[in-house]
Image (tube, helix red, strand yellow):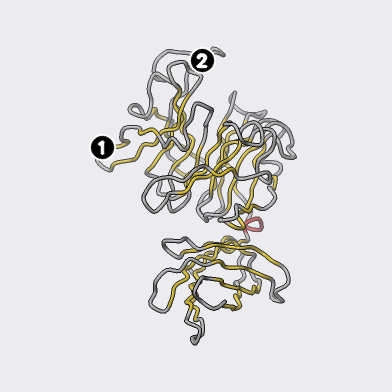
């Protein structure tokens, strides 16, 4: 690694390395990415931006105890650029070791042991405001966070599925990887975390899980028998039966195609059981939700200045992860709402 310093346990400090997948199960020899990412301090990559051109790096201070999260971006000609310290909404005098950027780049999930949480490290979220600044951190609440530690959040490219590791939920031992789904963005509603189970999780620490955009391949860090020592990187391929989800995204607009801030309630066909509540982005009118394939759902759309709009959504069957577009156009009191939807 860069430099010859060791940490308090006698281990050499971490550097960031790069390896390229060359075929089925084959990877190139790992190479040190060098400066400006690596320094004489502890440098660890904890996440990539959705476009793959931004890297989040955790770097310690000279004391090798405290540290901050930094961002660097890839330039086609010159490679990785200088590290820029992330916003003070994230970095504090407390410990913030990991972060993940949402697909559109306007939300960041991160962990911190700052006061006011539920104990240990908690997961927080910040949003970018219309003026470009960042909101105050929002704790994801007691459904996700426990009195113990939650770490290594990864928000999937669907924008609503959050993976994280915890040693506070019902684990097999140490850190296990869990999955939760955002049900209502404005109200901070999350589904009960689901343990991804064996063989991904073991009695040891299983952490820093990431998932490919198509949902088929995951990577994570684990210390388990058969490894090369310490935390190794593992790959897991999910059978299609575990990936039967439909990602529905779209726009809510008026008749002039202007975006509308609205609330979309998803119910069972009889309108008796609430499946989820989804709020559109206040600037773009976009919404995104994850539904079970082959189902029929009743949608109720509420927006200030418009009559309530109701319609039915038939979600196609899917053997794996399917993405469809479903746009909603709200009319005036005299007009009927129109919808457009197409598979993608």
Percent coordinates x, y for residue 60 in the rendering: 46, 23
Q: In the image, what residue occupies the spot 49% across and 26% down?
A: 93
SS assignment at label 1: loop
For residue 17, above or below residue 183:
above
Residue placed furthest toward the left: 77
SS assignment at label 2: loop
> Disc 2 designates what residue?
7
For residue 336, above or below residue 131:
below
Percent coordinates x, y for residue 89 in the rendering: 46, 38
- Toward the viewer: 165 or 225? 165
Q: Is residue 263 left or right of residue 50?
A: right
- Mark 2 neighbour density, 10 Å: few (under 14) some (14–19) many (20 or more): some
Q: In the image, what residue occupies the spot 70% across and 74% down?
A: 271
Percent coordinates x, y for residue 80 in the rendering: 32, 36
Ranked by sequence position, the earlier of labels 1 and 2 is 2
Mark drawn on residue 321: none
Residue placed furthest toward the front: 305
> Disc 1 designates what residue?
78
Percent coordinates x, y for residue 333 in the rendering: 50, 83
Q: The N terminus lies in which quarter of the figure?
A: top left
Q: Quadrant of residue 112?
A: top right
CA separation, marks 1 and 2? 32 Å
Q: In the image, what residue occupies the spot 67% across and 53% down?
A: 191
- Mark 1 neighbour density, 10 Å: few (under 14) some (14–19) many (20 or more): few
Dot in front, 1 or 2: 2
Q: Tell me whether circle 1 and circle 2 mark residues in contact (CB < 8 Å).
A: no
């Amino acid at each position: 690694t860069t430099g010859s310093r060791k940490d308090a346990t006698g281990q050499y400090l971490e550097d960031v390395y790069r390896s390229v997948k060359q075929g089925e199960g084959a990877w190139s020899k790992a190479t040190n990415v060098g400066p400006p990412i690596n320094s004489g301090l502890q440098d660890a990559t904890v996440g990539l931006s959705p476009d793959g051109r931004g890297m989040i790096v955790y770097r310690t201070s000279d004391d090798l105890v405290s540290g901050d999260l930094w961002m660097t971006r890839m330039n086609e000609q010159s490679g990785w650029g200088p590290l820029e310290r992330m916003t003070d909404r994230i970095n504090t005098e407390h410990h913030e070791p990991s972060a993940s950027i949402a697909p559109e780049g306007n939300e960041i999930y991160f962990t911190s042991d700052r006061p006011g949480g539920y104990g240990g490290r908690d997961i927080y979220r910040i949003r970018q405001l219309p003026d470009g600044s960042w909101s105050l951190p929002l704790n994801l609440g007691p459904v996700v966070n426990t009195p113990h530690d939650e770490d290594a959040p990864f928000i999937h490219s669907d924008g609503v599925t959050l993976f994280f590791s915890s040693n506070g939920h019902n684990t097999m031992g140490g850190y296990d990887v869990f999955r939760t789904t955002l049900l209502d963005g404005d109200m901070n509603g999350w589904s009960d975390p689901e343990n991804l189970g064996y063989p991904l999780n073991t009695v040891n620490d299983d952490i820093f899980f990431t998932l490919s955009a198509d949902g088929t391949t995951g990577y994570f860090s684990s210390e388990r028998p058969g490894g090369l020592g310490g935390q190794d990187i593992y790959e897991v391929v999910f059978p299609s039966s575990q990936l039967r989800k439909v990602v529905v995204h779209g726009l809510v607009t008026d008749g002039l195609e202007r975006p509308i801030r609205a609330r979309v309630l998803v119910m069972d066909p009889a309108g008796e059981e609430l499946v989820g509540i989804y709020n559109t982005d206040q600037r773009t009118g976009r919404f995104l939700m994850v539904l079970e394939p082959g189902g029929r759902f009743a949608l109720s759309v509420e927006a200030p200045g418009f009559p309530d709009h109701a319609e039915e959504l038939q979600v196609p069957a899917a053997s794996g992860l399917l993405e469809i577009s479903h746009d909603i156009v709200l009319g005036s009191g005299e007009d009927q709402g129109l919808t457009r939807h197409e598979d993608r």
